[in-house]
């Protein structure tokens, strides 16, 4: 049973189509870690537009995979970019999202033998 993600929305959206579910999972596993690097880079160099664009890109995926805490935290990253906040105030939030994404990917790879 999945602990770090929930595929209920994916199954609902796809009418229980296993191929669609695998496409969503594969995209998450391959693209989100790369996107997270760009968010981190944007935070590090205070490129708020870069951080925002990639945070905005992964936001629907976090929601779709039932990663509620990570979804709420990515909203915080978006808000931080809009007000061009200081780096130290967003570091812990980013670290939390990254940790949740890594755990979900590890669990998905195990559950789906990817």
Image: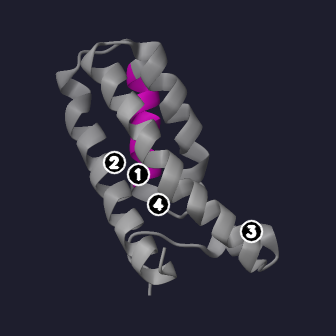
Q: Which residues are magenta?
A: 70-80
From the top left corner, tell me how far across and down residue 57 is, in percent: 58, 36
Q: Secondary structure at mark 1?
A: helix
Is disc 2 in contact with disc 1, using a CB cutoff of under 8 Å? Answer: yes
How many numbered discs sit on the rendered protein?
4
Does label 2 or label 1 sit earlier along the sequence? Answer: 1
Q: Which residue is mark 4?
A: 67
> Could you tell whether 108 is left or right of 92 in the image?
right
Q: Quadrant of residue 40?
A: top left
Distance from label 3 to label 2 (Cα)?
A: 25 Å
Dots 2, 4 in contact, CB < 8 A = no
Residue shown at the point (17%, 24%) measured from the top left: 88
The answer to which of marks 2 and 4 sits earlier in the sequence is 4
Residue underneath mark 3: 20
Mark 1 or mark 3: whose residue is earlier in sequence: 3
Q: Secondary structure at mark 3?
A: helix
Rendered position, 10 above or below 47 = below
Viewer-nearest of discs 1 and 3: 3
- Decide if residue 61 is in sight here: yes
Q: Are marks 3 and 4 in contact (CB under 8 Å)?
A: no
Mark 4 to mark 1: distance in Å?
Answer: 6 Å
Q: Is disc 4 in contact with disc 1, using a CB cutoff of under 8 Å?
A: yes
Q: Residue furthest right?
A: 15
Any magenta on residue 75? yes
Residue 43: x percent and y percent? 31, 22
Tell me how far mark 3 sits from mark 4, CA to CA. 19 Å
**Distance in Å between CA atoms under marks 2 and 4:** 10 Å
| Residue with the mark numbered 2 | 97
Residue at image location 24% in from the left, 43% down from the top: 95
Q: Which residue is mark 1?
A: 70
Residue 59 sits in quarter: top right
């Amino acid at each position: 049973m999945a602990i770090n993600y929930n595929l209920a929305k994916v199954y609902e959206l796809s009418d229980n189509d296993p191929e669609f579910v695998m496409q969503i999972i594969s995209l998450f596993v391959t693209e989100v870690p790369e996107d997270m690097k760009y968010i981190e880079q944007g935070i590090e160099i205070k490129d708020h537009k870069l951080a925002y664009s990639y945070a905005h890109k992964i936001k629907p995926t976090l929601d779709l995979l039932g990663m509620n805490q990570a979804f709420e935290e990515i909203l915080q990253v978006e808000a931080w970019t809009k007000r061009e906040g200081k780096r130290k105030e967003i570091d812990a939030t980013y670290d939390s999202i990254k940790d949740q994404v890594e755990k979900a990917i590890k669990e998905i790879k195990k559950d789906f033998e990817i």
